Amino acid sequence: MKAIRIEANGGPDVIALTDIAEREPGLGEVLVRNHAIGVNFIDVYHRTGLYKSALPNGLGLEAAGIVEAIGDGVTRFSVGDRIVYANGPIGAYAEAHVVKQTQAVKLPDAIPFDIAAASLLKGMTARFLLRKTFRVERGHDVVVHAAAGGVGQIAVQWAKHLGANVIAVVGNDEKAAIAKSLGADHTIIPGRDDVAKRVREITSVGAHVVYDSVGKDTFIASLDSLRPLGMMVAFGNASGPPPDINPLALAQRGSLFLTRPTMFNYTATVEQLDETSADLFAVIEKGAVKIAAPTRYALSDASQAHRDLEARKTTGSLVLIP
Ligand code: NDP
């Protein structure tokens, strides 16, 4: 089968389409024929080596498809089921993939494969951020960085659905218009606007929570945007890892809370995975969160998908079609 492999860490050019042998599913595993594959910023971190993984390796953690074979002990799925997975193992950029039954969920009939691959990892991220890491309630002032991106578009809509006052931080006017169309109450463009100053003008005392996936370029401005006892959620490194900080920096800004969460800890058990994905599918099916048609690339164009994502050219989600 065709699959993406990387022999070494590096730029998008290390991504190569190769032929590899398909493997039989083992105990508790299923073989999935992928119909649409999610592209996530974490795939860039795996490719560059910011997040270490053994090499040579595949890429990608997420895809939606049909169960083609099941290993011994599989009880969650049958051959022919439509399923989606977002917890790897690494290697989803391929025509087919073997995953543990405990790391996949059944796909509701109403959700097409491309929408599922565009939304499971990003939507479960939005869900744990807004419902678990900091529980957003009606009237909270919430800052969402990269608000027109994959996670961002879902987070803006979900936060609005929860009744928050949403302040969207985006890279340009076109992205600001997208965030507004999804319900954002305010938009801020770093470089043109002073992020912390604008958040303070809008909220008078600062935000209850900042969801910062940009990292290096925005981390300090995000801290400066919070009210006393506010929660800084640093959940990504799109511009590079955030700087080291002294805990005193949190005290000086008003006894702030700081967390650096990852989805994998919030969906580690099958119960957490089922609860998180069911909540996501529910907000999608009732229309509270709309998943824009993802930008599609052929599997063989995975390197171009990475180039576009890293160059901040994309909005919403990207999928690869095998
Ligand atoms: P996005 O579609 O959001 O793409 C990244 C966006 O980050 C860009 O579009 C851009 O938006 C913004 N950005 C700002 N500075 C840079 C830069 N220097 N280089 C590249 N992008 C930049 O990607 P995803 O939806 O896949 O992921 C969003 C973020 O969420 C990532 O940082 C990812 O690591 C993180 N994440 C974390 C998870 C976790 O469990 N902790 C799980 C899933 C995602 P703009 O131009 O508007 O600034």
Image: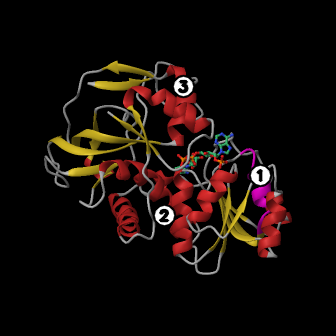
Res 269 seen here: yes
| Residue position marked by numbered label 1 in the rendering | 190
Which residues are the magenta region? 216-226
Disc 1 crowd rating (10 Å Cα; few below 14, some 14-19, many 20+) is some
Q: Considering only vertical position in the picture, is 49 above or below 249?
A: above
> Mark 3 or mark 2: which comes first in sequence?
3
Give the SS element for disc 1.
loop
Which of the two discs, 3 and 2, sits closer to the camera? 3
Q: Nearer the viewer, residue 34 or 257?
A: 34
Quarter of the figure with residue 281: bottom left
Image side of residue 221 versus residue 41, left or right: right
Tell me, yes or no, whether the highlighted magenta stretch contains residue 195.
Answer: no
Q: Amino acid at mark 1?
A: Pro
Q: Quadrant of the N terminus?
A: top left
Please tell me which residue is depicted at 59% across the width and 81% down the height of the picture.
138
Q: Quadrant of the C terminus?
A: top left
Image side of residue 1 versus residue 190, left or right: left
- Indicate if the residue with disc 1 has its beta carbon within 8 Å of ligand 1: yes
Please tell me which residue is depicted at 51% across the width and 60% down the height of the picture.
154
Please tell me which residue is depicted at 35% across the width and 65% down the height of the picture.
278
> Mark 3 or mark 1: which comes first in sequence?
3
| Residue position marked by numbered label 3 in the rendering | 12
| Residue position marked by numbered label 2 in the rendering | 127
Quarter of the figure with residue 307: top right
Q: Amino acid at mark 2?
A: Arg
Q: Nearer the viewer, residue 145 or 32?
A: 145
Give the SS element for disc 2.
helix
- Give the CA separation, mark 3 to mark 2: 30 Å
Image side of residue 74 versus residue 95, left or right: left
